[in-house]
Image: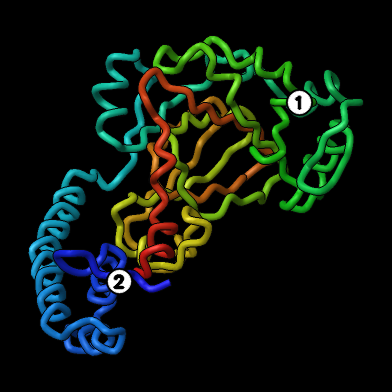
Amino acid sequence: MLPTMDEVGLAPGWRRWIRAALERGCTPAAIARDLICEGVEEALAVREIGIIDDALGELSPRLELLRRMLDTVETGRIERRPLCDADTFFRECFTRYRPVLFARGASGLRAAGWSFTALRDRFGERSLTIGERRMSVAEAVDAFLSDAPPELYITSGDRALHGPLVELRDDLTPLPDFLKADAPTSANLWMGPAGTTSPLHHDTTHVYFCQLVGRKRYRLVAPWKPQVLTAPIERGWDSTFDVERAGAEGVHDLVLEPGDALYIPTGWWHRVDALDPSISVSLRSFRWPAAHAWYAPGTYRRQHGS
């Protein structure tokens, strides 16, 4: 059903359509012709297009200025620092909206003592679902340490810490004091062979990512980088932007060693590659509000045609 006109002008649906068309580069004259064909009076069409075009003209330079300001405060590298207390974390990390690599930031967890062989000895007969496959922990570990394909990868979707390996949550202590005491109850396990990949995406909550066994390579891109936002975005938060393309700008490249932790704010794009057989845990329950389910620029683009 087509949007209607309200008492003072075009209905919101038509105004959103005009804005999207202008942002795509359509001329006001072409937009006016389409509106007139849909039964909108010419004077009303011209007036509404002019108002929206003027507003976009004022907004675009401001957004560009904001983007440049954000670029100026970006250091060109991800800060690496020791673990800190909650007050320092809130002041210097959480409110600055920048990823931070905490060297040895996961080394205080009991889980830092995990190993593939220890998990096999402890849970070997337990049955796991990995993607669409069902296998024992012992079979999975043996595969991870030999020639398993990278698709054989325990991820958040397999919910291993909420079922077959729930006891491992007890090892996610002691926590940094900027995380809630109940953080392990929403933790996710990531375990697999060398070569696994999580394609470029962003999360809708802040994440404290703990690397426990093996190494992982992270490529991160700030949320406001236009080259990621203008690339096709799938499901609202998966970007097709190629961080490995020669000359790709604004890509932060770092490696997490065993015991390191990475704080990733909502919206920061990241691709993750396992350099070794790897075990990691992600924690998401901070002492301050950290979930932003509304943040999905790809969904917005689909809904508004931009």
Given the current orientation, which residue lies at the most extreme right position? Answer: 125
The answer to whether 23 is drawn above or below residue 208 in the figure is: below
* Mark 1 crowdedness (10 Å alpha carbons): few <14, some 14-19, many ≥20: few
Q: Which residue is drawn at 51% across and 11% down?
A: 181
Q: Which colour scheme is used?
A: rainbow
**Residue 23 percent location from the top left of the image:** 25, 72
Q: Tell me the residue that label 2 is attached to.
A: 17
Question: Which quadrant would the C terminus be assigned to in this image?
Answer: bottom left
Q: Which residue is drawn at 46% across and 15% down?
A: 180
The answer to whether 32 is drawn above or below residue 157 in the figure is: below
Say what secondary structure mark 1 lies in.
loop
Which picture quadrant has residue 171? top right
Q: Say whether residue 70 is left or right of residue 133.
A: left
Name which of mark 1 and mark 2 comes first in the sequence.
2
**Residue 58 percent location from the top left of the image:** 8, 63
Q: Which residue is drawn at 23% across and 83% down?
A: 31
In front: label 1 or label 2: 2
**Residue 112 percent location from the top left of the image:** 61, 20
* Mark 2 crowdedness (10 Å alpha carbons): few <14, some 14-19, many ≥20: some
Q: Distance between the residues labelled 1 and 2?
A: 47 Å
Q: Tell me the residue that label 1 is attached to.
A: 163
Q: How many labels does the image show?
A: 2
Task: Please name the amino acid that badge 1 sits on.
Answer: Gly
Q: Are marks 1 and 2 in contact (CB under 8 Å)?
A: no
Let me know if residue 244 appears in the view.
no
Q: Which residue is drawn at 70% across and 26% down?
A: 162
Task: Please name the amino acid that badge 2 sits on.
Answer: Trp
In the image, 39 versus 68, the foreground residue is 39
Which picture quadrant has residue 157? top right
